[in-house]
Image: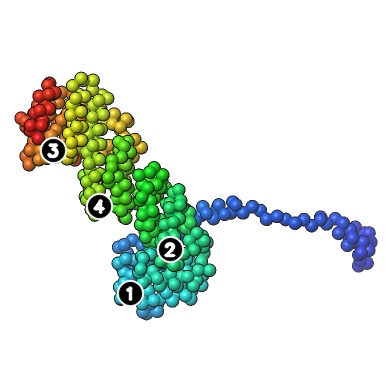
């Protein structure tokens, strides 16, 4: 070979290099692409997949705890995943087991693993255990906080975000108050806590602890619209479940704002409807938040509901019945309520009246008519009933030409309040102690005489 170029022409090496350089594009500095989309994608993933560890069901926790105890004592780590270790940690640090002496070896093992395990799923999972099992003053909370604080610089993205928003995270005495401040300053506390890394704010033990201080800070101003809105954003979040466990003190604070005065009718009605839509009607349900509720505040809510049901009935009849005798009857019953004679009231709407009430009297669209009121089924549902307790008497009044009927409350034939269904003709046949409204004066005197 004579060293000729493939095209048969000879080129000096220096000329070849010069030619190559002349064809090379000039160097340019390349800018990094915008990171906003990446950040949004990460946030989307964290929000929709809050954690890899599935919280074990209560029925499975004892088995998980005992299995982990067996593995620790026998130092048997075959066929076990990090996820199962974290699930066992949730079990041994829950309210039922966190103080059990027999499970102490498991708790000690988990603490040693926090200190020695490489950063990753286990360490991040134990932060979740700490946050969810948080209990003020508890030994396990203090020990977990101390162990995790030493590794805080190695936490993953989700918990790094939480630490940035809540630097006091691993200071158990300070964290709840600091978190309560974040909740108080937020427009929507539930959404804000999710955004900083608490995937289930209502379940988190840390947030439950912070809730008390949050409510205490709102309580003095709950007669104002903005603090009430903030409270309901936490209790009944738009994109989350209604708070049940621990909601009682919050509802008590809401009602206590009106302990010494009565709110305007529209506000009283909207508060009543919001409360019973979220936590059931205390006249129908004794459990839930109502089992340990402040008796005085509960009695106040019952008075509100009594007034509201009477107003529902009266407003419905006023709007649908053109009878000159109705307005004085309405005024008579409302006057008895104002005089504190009517202890309880319940409405059983006929079908037409129920539709009218749903469309015109109830606002917000959250009220279930079948739970909120009884139904009157006789006469094609054309008659509606107002059932009242006045002292030891049960008084039943009805729209149109239905007479007023009075029973003793201990009479077996007396209709009971808060039933789902009523039959007005059965009530009419059950007593002879009744009076028509043909003369309002004599009728009202008769009512006062018999109650």
Q: Secondary structure at mark 2?
A: helix
- Dot 4 lies on which element? loop
Q: Residue at x 34, y 76 (%)?
A: 104
Q: Is 275 located above or below residue 446 in the figure? A: below
Residue tagged by mark 4?
A: 293
**Nearer-the-camera pick, 273 or 8:** 273
Residue 372, percent across and down? 25, 39
**Viewed as shown, does residue 433 lie left or right of 312?**
left
Please name the residue that numbered disc 1 is placed on: 103
Of marks 3 and 1, which one's residue comes earlier in the chain? 1
> Farthest residue toward the bottom?
74
The mark that comes first in sequence, 2 or 1, is 1
**Colour pattern of the rendering:** rainbow
| Tag nearer the camera, 1 or 4 | 4
How packed mark 4 is, by other alpha carbons closer than 10 Å (few <14, some 14-19, many 20 or more), is: some
Residue farthest front in this picture: 260
Where's the C terminus, which quadrant?
Answer: top left
Q: Earlier in the sequence, mark 2 or mark 4?
A: 2
In terms of sequence position, does the residue under pointer 1 or pointer 4 come before the other? 1
Q: Position of residue 19 (x, y in %)?
A: 89, 58
Residue at point 8% right, 28% down? 446
């Amino acid at each position: 070979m004579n060293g000729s170029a493939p095209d048969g022409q000879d080129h000096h090496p220096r000329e070849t290099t010069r030619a190559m350089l002349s064809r090379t594009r000039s160097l340019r500095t390349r800018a990094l692409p915008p990171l906003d989309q990446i950040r949004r994608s990460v946030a989307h993933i964290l929000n929709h997949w809050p954690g890899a560890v599935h919280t074990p069901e209560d029925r499975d926790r004892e088995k998980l705890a005992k299995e982990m105890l067996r593995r620790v004592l026998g130092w048997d780590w075959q066929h076990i995943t990090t996820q199962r270790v974290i699930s066992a940690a949730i079990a041994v640090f829950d309210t039922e087991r966190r103080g059990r002496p027999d499970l102490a070896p498991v708790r000690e093992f988990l603490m040693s693993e926090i200190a020695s395990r490489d950063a990753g799923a286990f360490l991040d999972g134990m932060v979740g255990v700490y946050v969810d099992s948080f209990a003020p003053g508890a030994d396990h909370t203090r020990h977990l906080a101390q162990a995790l604080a030493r590794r805080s610089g190695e936490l993953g993205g989700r918990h790094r975000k939480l630490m940035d928003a809540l630097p006091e995270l691993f200071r158990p005495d300070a964290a709840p108050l600091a978190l309560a401040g974040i909740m108080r300053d937020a427009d929507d506390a539930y959404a804000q806590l999710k955004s900083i890394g608490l995937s289930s704010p209502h379940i988190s033990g840390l947030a439950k602890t912070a809730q008390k201080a949050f409510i205490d800070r709102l309580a003095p101003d709950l007669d104002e619209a903005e603090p009430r809105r903030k409270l309901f954003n936490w209790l009944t979040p738009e994109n989350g479940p209604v708070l049940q466990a621990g909601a009682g003190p919050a509802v008590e604070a809401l009602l206590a704002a009106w302990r010494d005065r009565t709110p305007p009718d529209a506000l009283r009605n909207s508060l009543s409807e919001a409360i019973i839509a979220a936590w059931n009607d205390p006249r129908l349900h004794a459990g839930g938040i109502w089992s340990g509720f402040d008796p005085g505040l509960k009695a106040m809510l019952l008075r509100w509901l009594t007034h509201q049901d009477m107003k529902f009935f009266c407003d419905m009849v006023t709007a649908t019945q053109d009878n000159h005798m109705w307005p004085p009857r309405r005024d008579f019953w409302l006057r008895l309520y104002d005089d504190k004679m009517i202890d309880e009231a319940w409405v059983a709407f006929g079908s037409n009246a129920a539709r009218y009430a749903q469309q015109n009297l109830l606002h917000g669209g959250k009220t279930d008519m079948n739970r909120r009121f009884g139904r009157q089924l006789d006469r094609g549902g054309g008659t509606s009933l107002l059932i009242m307790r006045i002292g030891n008497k049960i008084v039943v009044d009805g729209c149109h030409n239905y007479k007023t009927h009075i029973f003793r409350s201990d009479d077996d034939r007396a209709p009971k309040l808060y039933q789902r269904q009523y039959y007005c003709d059965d009530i009419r046949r059950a007593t002879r102690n009744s009076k028509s409204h043909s003369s309002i004066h004599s009728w009202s005197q008769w009512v006062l005489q018999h109650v």
